[in-house]
Amino acid sequence: MKANLFIMGYLLIISCFNVIAELNFYRDPFVEPTQTSCNEQKEILLKQIQAWRFKGLIQHKSHYYPQIWLYSENQWLAINQEVHSKVLFPWFLQSWQNHKIVWQANLTDYCHETIEWTMLINES
């Protein structure tokens, strides 16, 4: 019984040291941070937004902005211009016209860029 308790205590102390060592490794200023290149970020974001297709809109009398319906891989998404979608983050509606929706996303701070993509409304 005492031997098992001693072994469990020893393993607990070892695991605590491993966690502390990992935390210190991530804080080490000499370890190269892994950053995604700006072009790779653009590609990832474009794939994210291009997966969605415009399916329709609903104009409420009580709301100024229409509700836009998008569809992607058995998922429906209803959004409007007032509320930013968590599913499409970091994309947001930049502008909206009768025949197209312009989406915009900000890249990470070290890129200092934004990216835009136009979704045609008459596509099906």
Image (cartoon, rainbow, N blue to C red):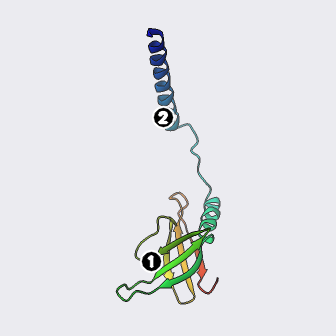
Q: Quadrant of residue 103?
A: bottom right
Residue found at the far front of this picture: 1
Q: Give how far across and how far down residue 114 sits, in percent.
A: 54, 68
- 10 Å crowding of disc 1: few (<14), some (14-19), many (20+): some
> Mark on residue 23?
2
Residue lying at 54% horizontally and 72% vertically, measured from the top left: 76
Task: Give the amino acid at mark 1.
Answer: Asn
Seen in the image, is 2 located left or right of residue 38?
left
Q: Residue furthest left?
A: 62
Where disc 2 sits, the SS reads helix
- The residue depicted at 51 percent of the width and 72 percent of the height is 77
Label annotation for residue 80? 1
Q: Amino acid at mark 2?
A: Leu
The structure residue drawn at horizontal position 61% and vertical position 60%, both measured from the top left corner, is 41
Residue 122's place in the image compared with 39, above or below, is below
Question: Which quadrant, please, contains the C terminus?
Answer: bottom right
Q: Position of residue 61 (x, y in %)?
A: 37, 89
